[in-house]
Image: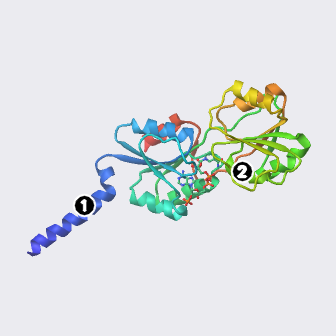
Amino acid sequence: MGRVLRILRWRVRRQRRVRRWGLRAEGLFRVLILGGTTEGRALAAACAAMPGVEVISSLAGRTSKPLLPTGRVRVGGFGGAEGLAAYLREEAIAALVDATHPFAATITAHAADASSRVGVPLLVLRRPGWAEQPGDDWHRVPTLESAAALLPELGERIFLTTGRQSITAFAQVDSCWFLSRSVEQPTPPMPKHLKILLDRGPFTLDGEHALLTEHRIEVLVTKDSGGPTAKLDAARAHGIPVVLVDRPPLPPEAPTVPTIEATLTWLGRL
Ligand code: NAP
């Protein structure tokens, strides 16, 4: 009887170990991608094609119809850095890639914190920011609030492309008219003189030209997100100024790469 009990206990312990470490024991390598971006989706597709790799993408759940990445997907916050650390442990994550938007600073800080708590290696994947070209009239500002403060001296008709959550920073700028473009409907407080355009990129150069002309836009406001440049190219061609909000700083301890290829190399080394 005692022997049977010992064997049963041993089996339970083994099952627990297998559940926790089984993926590693089987040679599988589980990667958690913090996503919600084009890069996050491209990386998930690339990882899913790698033999021996299982990928989980995490989305914040901000948009009602998100573009879903390949592979397993989870949606919603983790409950801070502590919650993310617990998730890394429970799911036996072997590598964490932060492929979130350059302005999603909170989750990036949480990723660095959770990674150091649990000892799971972290890489930040960030596409490069934009670079000014001849013919550009750019005004770099540190925050959305400083962008709002600058607008009245640059023009009256503003094309706002900083995203739904950023519109409140411009709510008090009564002397300007805004065309705001976002994927989802923004919520108050919002500027008094406002037209909302619900649309999702990628946007074409012709389309951007048409918008600037139709709405007689005098200033473009954008975050330095990087990626496709159609709106910046159109602004240059129209000779209109661009107010560019600088990126928040990255956590110093996390290595950062600009491309999917560099991320795959990092994963390969692990
Ligand atoms: P944020 O301010 O850095 O994050 C706020 C909270 O949202 C985090 O503390 C976390 O909640 C949760 N969260 C954010 N990203 C998450 C993810 N990928 N998976 C699970 N939980 C996440 O982020 P945000 O600016 O609201 O952006 C949210 C998402 O939208 C990100 O995935 C980002 O890539 C995407 N996005 C953002 C922008 C932008 O301009 N900010 C633009 C395009 C796409 P807990 O603390 O509860 O874990």
Quarter placement of the N terminus: bottom left
Asked which secondary structure carries label 2, the reply is helix
Respond yes or no on whether mark 2 lies under 8 Å from ligand 1: yes
Residue found at the very far left of the displayed protein: 1
62 lies above or below 131 = below
Q: Residue at x 44, y 59 (%)?
A: 87
What is the three-letter code of the residue carrying label 1? Gln
Quarter placement of the C terminus: top left
Left or right side of 253 for 50: left
Q: Name the mark on residue 203.
A: none
Tell me the quarter of the picture where residue 236 sits: top right
Q: Residue at x 39, y 35 (%)?
A: 49
Label 2: few (<14), some (14–19) or many (≥20) C-alpha neighbours in 10 Å: some
Label 1: few (<14), some (14–19) or many (≥20) C-alpha neighbours in 10 Å: few
Position in image of residue 199 (x %, y %): 64, 38
Position in image of residue 154 (x %, y %): 89, 40
Respond yes or no on whether mark 1 lies under 8 Å from ligand 1: no
Q: Residue at x 53, y 44 (%)?
A: 66
| Mark 2, residue position | 166
Res. 235 in view: no
What is the three-letter code of the residue carrying label 2? Ser
- The mark lying in front, picked from 2 and 1, is 2
| Mark 1, residue position | 15
**Colour style of the rendered protein structure:** rainbow
Residue found at the very far bottom of the displayed protein: 2
87 lies above or below 218 = below
Res. 213 in view: yes
Asked which secondary structure carries label 1, the reply is helix
